[in-house]
Image: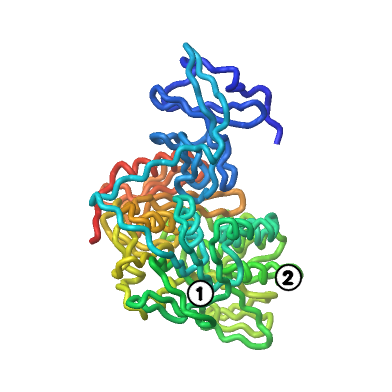
Amino acid sequence: MAISNNLPNFRSGIEVRDVADGAIVPGRVDSEEAILVRRGEEFFAVGAQCTHYHGALAAGLAVGDTIRCPLHHACFSLRTGEALRAPALDPIACWRVERAGAKVFVRERIDSERRPTPKPSAPEDGKADAAPSSVTIIGGGAAGLAAADRLRREGYSARIIVISADTSPPYDRPNLSKDFLMGTAPAEWMPLRTPEYYAERKIELLLDSPVASLDLKRRTVQLERGPQVEFGALLVATGAGPVRLDIPAAGGARLLYLRTFADAQAIVAAAAAAKRVVVVGASFIGLEVAASLRQRGIQVHVVGPERIPFERVLGAQIGTFVREIHESHGVIFHLGTSVAHVDGRRVTLKDTACIEADFVVIGAGVRPTIKLAEQAGLAIDRGVLVNQYLETSAAGVFAAGDIARWPDPYSGERIRVEHWVVAERQGQIAALNMLGRRQRFDAVPFFWSQHYDVTINYVGHAESWDAIDVDGSLSSRDCAVTYRRGGRILAVASISRDLESLEAERNFELTQTGATDG
């Protein structure tokens, strides 16, 4: 991509007085786009684009000695360029900055091999545990890959084995219902890492390998098809599976679900010759599927028991707004009912209405996959219970992602959320704690949902609320929606206010309750 010559070249220097404290100045280093950030009397120069979805960091937020991406809240070190928090896993460019008189100059690029390693935070009890003899990770999703990646980045050199029931290497799951299903992201874009990545880092990846059982006393994992695998430390990151509805089907009816890459590929194949589709469930996945199929020119009917989409999570105002967006794109809703049965292409609803459809996609939510953990004797309560370090009731056994129920330092309650970014960040913190770092998981939950050209960002966690305040206008697609209970802010949803979403995340971080094991 060509870089505008109108951008200042930081090589030539920039006046100190022209850079306010906390400012993010866009520019370039010769032909490479960069930003200059001032924090007090320190100046930092780093790459201008997030390594996740190429968000413009100039529109982000500097917090301490970090820079945060406005799109999906990835966080990078201004000192080293390292990706500190998911969803970005790769570093951004970083240059040395020198002050000379009234100007600052960007000098040589700091190669990744020469970047200083961030000093790990000291364990809360002052005693770091010894690194485990090996690490086994059950689950090849967001949390599993993020954990393996962080272990290697921290210099852990012993055996890492990732055991996945999926047939595909770790992939960009949020894209399954978005760009990939829409047809704007080819299959080769979906893997998060190349085969060479796993080979170079000596991460053993076992695909299509369901686990039969765990023996926590002997510290072994028994595969359904294969030998036992011993572990020094274990991360259980089995994720969630789709809620499967008991819908009578006959006559060659095609009922599809969307959870895996293979599922998405099956829907894409079915959509190639389809003219009309029924989506069951007005969930986030269901409506993202609806949007993607409409972009393909397919007529879409959405059926669901909900009165208003997203009402339980986002409230009636946003739910009604999202429905109107979909209706403006031709989606037909049948809410307050469900599917009675499907016979061939004929979908009969419980209110007796009938819809002709080439196939049906069921998006009725997911449930945490906790059977393995429960059978192994781990403490369970609507998920796998973990402490603030993401350690389960068994020493040296951690859980992360959709299955983990942890003590949230913001609400003071135990929560479990099914967000991609949360799963990745939990995998990263679990990895540090396997190495004895004793780092609390205190990241603020974040997710995003895309509906045509409207993206909703959501930061925080509100299972219930007694007040919703809308600043701005939903109809203008420019607003921040604040959820409160007892006067306390629990969450903020936003549209076209990315910086405000980052500021809400930072504010949550400043108001932790100090929750412990609970």
Q: Which mark, by number, is residue 337? A: 1
Camera sees residue 497: no
Give above or below for 146 relative to 362. Answer: above
Q: Which type of secondary structure does the marked residue at label 1 adopt? A: loop
x%, y% of residue 422? 43, 56
Amino acid on which the number 2 mark rests in the picture: Ala
Task: Give the residue at x 69% y 58%.
Answer: 188
Q: Nearer the viewer, residue 326 or 112?
A: 112
Identify which residue, 219 or 348, lies in the foreground: 219
Numbered badge on residue 274:
2
**CB within 8 Å, label 1 to label 2:** no
Give the residue type at disc 1: Thr
Residue 48 shows in this picture: yes
- Within 10 angstroms of label 2, few (less than 14), some, or many (20 or more) residues? some
Estimate the spatial distance between the alpha carbons at disc 1 and disc 2, rounded to whole Å: 24 Å
Percent of width and height locating residue 256:
61, 75
Q: Is residue 287 rendered to the left or right of residue 358?
A: left
